[in-house]
Amino acid sequence: MPNRRSIAATALLIVSMAAGAQTPPSLKNIYRGDFLVGSAINADQITGKDSRGDAVIESQFNTISPENALKWENIHPRPGVYDFDIPDQYVAFGEKHHMQIVGHVLVWHSQTPAWVFQDDKGNLVDRETLLKRLHDHIQTVVGRYKGRIHSWDVVNEAVNEDGTMRQSLWMKIIGEDYIAKAFQWAHEADPQAQLIYNDYSLENEAKRNGVLALIAKLKAQGVPVTTVGLQGHSSLTWPSIEAEDTTITAFATLGVKVAITELDIDVLPSATSQQTADVSLNFAQDPKLNPYFVGLPISVQQELAKRYADLFAVYLKHRDVVTRVTFWGVTDGDSWRNDWPIKGRTSYPLLFDRNGQPKPAFDAVIRVATEGKPAN
Ligand code: 9MR
């Protein structure tokens, strides 16, 4: 039975098709009222050098995330030295296009320069020193964009695959309360901002249980975590639709919102048996693992389209708690998947091809919004 939201989405689709066969419908309009739809954007898109990418971003998305521009190594490369050039342009881009602007990321074990953890002699600093550096970083960066950046990924990837705490330098030097402190300081710097704990592979039970326990503990302590980010770095076979459904329900039950923060679906043969998005992995090149360098076969296009449709059906089912769905990149050519975990492959993980044209997966995602979905 079509419900009111699917009738509205269908009407929108018909109107946009009538407006001209050349103009594809837009994700942000078709999912309006359900959740925002967005993309991570890169420096060329922020600065206007990639006009083809910008055209896709402006027509399709109502939220943006900075793929790399606000990471510590870029925004705060040396002690006392902040570089706000690209970050300022990023925020201005989002404001110009009336988008919800996401900040990524305040605390991560990766892309944080070595000096943050070291003294002048190269020895590890003590807890108080590192806490002060973390506080100053958060106050400066969050404070600068107060009221303009809507949501911050405050802590990224703090939990291991088995659910235990990752022994990062943050953890080793400060202890587990680095997480609570980061959220508290982000909240002090911008009390209105939505604050996110962001991680990958939470669809796997052991890791999910670890993060559920962490979030429950933080909430019990009154720490202002509002949202859990499911990164969504997926493949054609992982996660199962049941696992995605279970995961969203489990976090919703804790009283936090869920954002799909870094969605992409890998179609290439896997180089590892692990289900991971660990940026430190790097395997040797092997032609067998790069089978589609001349183009993606139609059968795989269709498999990808079905996977995207199945995942979006779950997000839609949970539209009462899912705040946004953000793709990790605009076109296939932009994706980090071309260089991870093997450099120089030809990957097809997104909805737009290397020319910025919508793929069958785009049509499938649009169709999900226009089919009747159970009311919440
Ligand atoms: O897509 C990002 C890639 O361009 C960077 O080289 C890499 C390291 O900074 O980070 C990638 O984005 C990661 C994100 O920040 C956190 N979750 C995993 C993402 C993919 O590695």
Image (cartoon, rainbow, N blue to C red):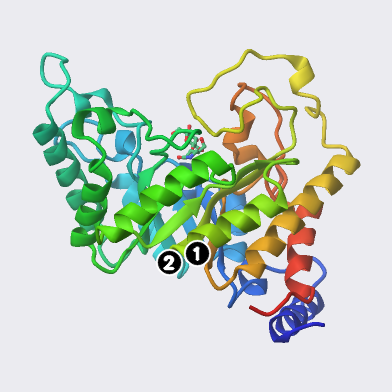
Report x, y in % for residue 373.
Answer: 74, 74
- In this view, the residue farthest toward the bottom is 4
Q: Determine which of the numbered discs, if any, sits on residue 327 in the image.
A: none
The image shows residue 372, relative to residue 225, as above or below, that is below
Camera-side residue of 37 and 69? 37
Report x, y in % for residue 234.
Answer: 65, 42
Residue positioned 74% across, 61% down in the render:
365
**Residue tagged 1:** 252
Q: Are marks 2 and 1 in contact (CB under 8 Å)?
A: yes
Q: Amino acid at mark 1?
A: Ala
In the structure shown, which secondary structural element does the residue marked by tag 1 occupy? helix
Side of 47 relative to 26 (left or right):
left
Q: Check disc 2: other Cα within 10 Å, few if <14, some if 14-19, many if 20+.
A: some
Q: Is residue 266 visible?
A: yes
Residue positioned 17% across, 20% down in the render:
124
Q: Is residue 23 visible?
A: no
Side of 150 relative to 138 (left or right):
right
Looking at the rendered image, the quarter that the N terminus falls into is: bottom right
Residue positioned 57% across, 35% down in the render:
336
**Residue tagged 2:** 255
Side of 30 relative to 108 (left or right):
right
Side of 123 relative to 15 (left or right):
left
Alpha-carbon distance for marks 2 and 1? Answer: 5 Å
Q: Amino acid at mark 2?
A: Gly
